[in-house]
Image (cartoon, rainbow, N blue to C red):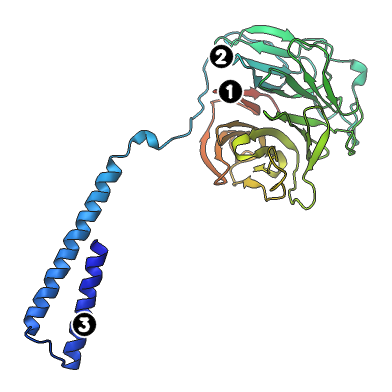
Amino acid sequence: MAANCVARSVLILLLVLHCVHRSCCIPRISQREIYDEVRQLLALSSNSLQKDIDDSREDSSELPEASISKPDVPKAVKNWPQKDLNLGQVSGVAVNSHLQPVIFHRAGRVWDENTFNSSHHYQQEHLGPIKDDTILTLDPKTGAIVGRWGASLFFLPHGLTIDRHNNLWVTDVALHQAFKFRPGDNYPSLSFGVPFQPGTGIRHLCKPTSIAVASTGEIFIADGYCNTRILKYNAAGGLLRVIPNPPEFLSLVVPHGLALIESLDRLCVADRENMRVTCPRAGLYSTRGETEPALTIQQPDMGRVFGVAAKGNLMYAVNGPTSFLLPVQGMTIDPQSETVIDHWAPEECLPETLANEYEIWSAQMENY
């Protein structure tokens, strides 16, 4: 309404000025009366415009503050666990359906510069598998061990994922394999890769790092330190897709962590050595759009991203040691806008991986 009044006033004013300039006359109305009429119209327009502005401010002030959602800020729980668990290098952490954190650790086994040769073959096979239990279930309140298994199964643990059916999915970089274990089983129901045989073919893996499992059953394996690719399988273990695959333009350098945002049909990757998080299409419901450009989040202070975890449509990520100039920290990411919206960190942490089931659990270790 105010805009219409202003427009009418401006048109009248232009008409008057035109008539004055052209010495035309307006019957029965003097120039003074015309100017008075214009001033009144302009005053009315100004008052109406101010009323519209005030009404708009009143409407916006009535909006509830809760309608503006803010992302959760992770905070470290002090004095957890309450007792030292005497762990080796912790490479994986996940959460089961009982909200219990489950960790995958290497006990006395260490990954260092002598562990692999230049062709990625494991050099310590003669040591045999780790004799200690490598998978521990913890009490979420105290950190006490409430379950343990995995002895004499793994050579160099890396990634751990738990799906909605409580199946455990793990990777072993020494074996160059990935496995699925049903609850309570010590023998894998699915195996990927060839034991101790790194390779680039579709039957081989090379130091696989992480696994993500969709509610639709599809399996994504980050492969890994050598092949720098993601392999997508159906629920029975049949290969469906290699990411990236031409004409996809996506260069990965050590895809170190995976997390699915199924509502966005995105698979988010901790692309470690590229110092970014990138989220290509997962193709869970349709293969259309699989060649769309990935959503990419990268900024100067991200550093090498080691792990990612999803909550709703947001992504939580942690970096690892990069340089003395970049802090080790966590980041809250909005993949849709491709921005980091928050930073957070405990006082002391070298994050390796993340798990998220209402709470964030971070493993602390060194560089591998």
Q: Secondary structure at mark 3?
A: helix
Left/right placement of residue 309 relative to residue 239 reads: left
Q: Alpha-carbon neighbours of circle 1 within 10 Å: few (<14), some, or many (≥20)?
A: some
The numbered mark, 1 or 3, whose residue comes first in the sequence reads: 3
- In the rendered image, the quadrant that contains the N terminus is bottom left
Question: Alpha-carbon distance for marks 1 and 2?
Answer: 18 Å
Nearer to us: label 2 or label 3? 3
Left/right placement of residue 294 relative to residue 190 reads: left
Nearer to us: label 1 or label 3? 3
Where does the image place residue 225, in percent across and percent down from the top left?
Answer: 80, 36
Foreground residue among 35 and 320 = 35
Residue in view at x 50 percent, y 25 percent = 75
Residue 113 in sight in this render: yes
Residue in view at x 32 percent, y 39 percent = 63
Q: Secondary structure at mark 1?
A: loop
Q: Which residue bears the numbered disc 2?
A: 80
| Res 357 label | 1
Where does the image place residue 356, in percent across and percent down from the top left?
Answer: 59, 25
| Res 15 label | 3
Quadrant position of residue 125: top right
